Image: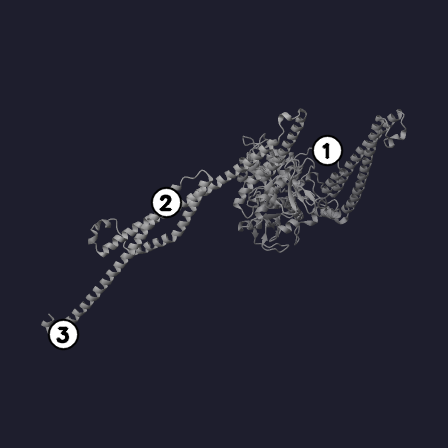
Amino acid sequence: MVKALGSSEEAVFLQQRLDDMNQRWSDLKAKSANIRAHLEASAERWSRLLGLLEELWRWICMKDEDLAKQMPIGGDVPTLLQQQNHCTTLRSELGEREHLVMSTLDQARMFLADQPIEGPGEPRKTLQPKADLSPEEKARVLARAIRKQTGEVRERWDRLKGHVGGWHTQVERALERLQELQSSMDQLDLRLTQAEEAKVTWQPVGDLLIDSLQDHIDKTMVAVEDRLKLLQEAHRDFGPSSQHFLSTSVQLPWQRAVSQNKVPYYINHQTQTTCWDHPKMTELYQSLGDLNNVRFSAYRTAMKIRRLQKALCLDLLDLNVAQNTFEQHKLTNNNQLLSVPDVINCLTSIYDGLEQEHKDLVNVPLCVDMCLNWLLNVYDTGRSGRIRVLSMRIGLLSLSKGHLEEKYKYLFSQVASAGDTCDQRQLGLLLHEAIQIPKQLGEVAAFGGSNIEPSVRSCFQHVTNKVELEPRHFVDWMHLEPQSMVWLPVLHRVAAAETAKHQAKCNICKECPIVGFRYRSLKHFNYDICQSCFFSGRTAKGHKLNYPMVEYCTPTTSGEDMRDFTKVLKNKFRSKKYFAKHPRLGYLPVQTVLEGDNMETPVTLISMCPEQYELAQMERSNGSLPTDSSSATGSMDDEHTLILQYCQTLGGESSPCSQPQSPAQILQAVEREEQGELERIIARLEEEQRTLQKEYEQLKEQHGQRGAPAGSCWESEGPSAHPDEAELLAEAKLLRQHKGRLESRMHILEEHNKQLESQLHRLRQLLHQPEVDSRVNGVSSPAVQDRGPVTDNSDELLDSHNSSSDLADVMEQINNSFPACSPSSLSSRPQVM
């Protein structure tokens, strides 16, 4: 065709195209030849890989069969040792082969990654004789074989490794136990051999003398008793109920020891002294002394209990967890007495649970030991080693974490009967156990004393003297914050205020922001006090503690700010007579049987906290309970108690129903009570002295009638005296000693009487001063007004800002003039918040 075209342009172009196609065909043939050569070389290489996989598969199957032949576990030590050696050898062989297996599997994976994935029907399409297969088809067949062999090798290899590991663990465990058994059998054989040798040395029974049998029996009994004592000591120190794990709660030079009744005590090897209190508990009690500068008893007590609660980690304990623990240990019988080991078991369960939730805060041995120490201090001061179930439950629940109303319900349920009600006796048990907590801190006097009968009567009078009390009645009564239990809600307010920050500035110490409690004046605008200044009684800008204030333990809202502004505005326009007619109390007053008066709240205070309660709004004149004067007389025998009571009266701590309304009445009341009581005591002592003197004269006459010298009663007892005479001389000696004590007691009373007379004289001078008379004239309000928190709908608050007409200033001058009789000198806890 090219020749036919000749030398035209078309012929030239066609010739070029033909040359190009020839060149491309040549290149394609060369490339095909190279690919064929490469495929043939790769086929030989992957055939070797397939052979290696088949060899590995056969080796794995062989080792698997060898392992199966070793089973089951042998029954003696040699067999187990042989099985252990075989297993160790097999594990080493697996370790040596593991690199080869892994590398082979990796090569197969790399080869298969370059091959196309076959569908399920593809293998059936290539059923042709091997001689007729093309190189490409041979490659596909080889890839399928490698893929199959790789999966089998990987599966058998993993299974073999798992079997070897499990078999090795079984062999090791069985060998360990069998060796322990063999060791025990060897020790038993040794002891049997020793026993047989000892038996050989025994003297034959026929050679023993009958008289020596009793000696042998006695020696055997002594040996048995010694052995039993050793076993008992070992069980006590290291048994399941031992206190050995608590020994780590103290550090050198301290050592924890246990008395015979299982009560722990602590030895200081450095000072060679012993004490009942844990060293950390001693440090805690000493640190509580820093809180004695808090003027108000309820807050002081609550802050002490809060510090104690955090030291014992009871602030981490939920109420329901504590209740479940009591039920788990079957502590349902309130009258059951728990031994110290029983208490430790219960506390250990509680603190083990707390440790799981708060690992960084709870040290179980230390917390158990300190909590046990606190429970013994509160409910077993005599260290008898016994605590009532009810005591422990009330103590732990009172310091647990939870909503205050829920805590009231839990406390009530501890003493409630099957019908979820309680009578006066059961309520008395609850209050008695609860009041022991502030009593142990020395604060019980501020909460009505240890006598709980007035509190019980107050509660049942609150429900119109019903026979039984329901939970809601008890909760309603507790919402009034009765005097004997006011420390418990205050404890919750203290806990709530610990982390509270108020965007306000203290007008005294200038602290900003105020952390903790915030006290806002309802008498002055923009007047705030922090808790430190308020508790210490500091004032500024003409403000007095008896002015109405509002307490916040959480940040205030705009609505609360507006409400307080409105109240301040109202108080500015209210007259003094209005406030004099509406005195308030900060808690439900409970009149104690011994004192016959109520503690006072020094400021008008409204509490604004997450858990608010309506507080009592009762006047002292008609709000106190009747006084049992018949039982009050028996506690007035001690002249120091009388002086304390009279000084409290001078300091303004007596109840309003007994408070005089003028200085003249103050003078008359103090003089009458003081002189009357002291004169009765002196008269009674003089009567006793006359009676004893008369008996002494009769004894002298009887002795003189028997012929003894009149002065023999003053001589020492002789060795040859008649027995009757010796008895008379001894009795006369005792009478002389008693007479001396009575005379010294009368002398002390006379000295106290003189001191009180001098103080009364100074009081008369102070009260008769012209400037004081001019300030007191025209005063119609009580000498000390009751001020406390109120949350009712009315805005009636006390106003005592007019210092020129307030008798409280007079009482302050009295306290300053008589520091020996002021409450702050007699006790660091004069008042209750």
Residue placed under numbered mark 3 in the picture: 9
- Residue 789 can be seen, yes or no: no
The amino acid type of the residue labelled 1 equals Gly
Mark 1 and mark 3 lie on one chain; the one further toward the N terminus is 3
State the SS at label 3: helix
How much space separates mark 1 and mark 3, taking CA atoms? 150 Å
The amino acid type of the residue labelled 3 equals Glu
| Quadrant of res 338 | top right
Residue placed under numbered mark 2 in the picture: 64
Pinpoint residue 206: horizontal percent, then vertical percent.
Answer: 63, 25
State the SS at label 2: helix
Q: Which residue extends farthest bottom?
A: 7
* Figure coloring: one colour
How much space separates mark 3 and mark 2, taking CA atoms? 81 Å
Residue placed under numbered mark 1 in the picture: 634
Badges 1 and 3: C-beta atoms under 8 Å apart?
no
- Residue at image coords 39%, 44%: 163
Mark 3 and mark 2 lie on one chain; the one further toward the N terminus is 3
Q: Can you tell which mark lies on residue 762? A: none
Q: Classify 10 Å Cα crowding around label 3: few (below 14), some (14-19), many (20 and above).
A: few
Q: Is residue 444 left or right of residue 9?
A: right
The amino acid type of the residue labelled 2 equals Asp
Closer-to-camera residue (763/644): 644
- Residue at image coords 18%, 68%: 22
Mark 2 and mark 1 lie on one chain; the one further toward the N terminus is 2
Mark nearer the viewer, 1 or 3: 3
How much space separates mark 2 and mark 1, taking CA atoms? 97 Å
Instruction: Look at the image and tell me in which quarter the C terminus lies.
Output: top right
Pinpoint residue 776: horizontal percent, then vertical percent.
Answer: 72, 46
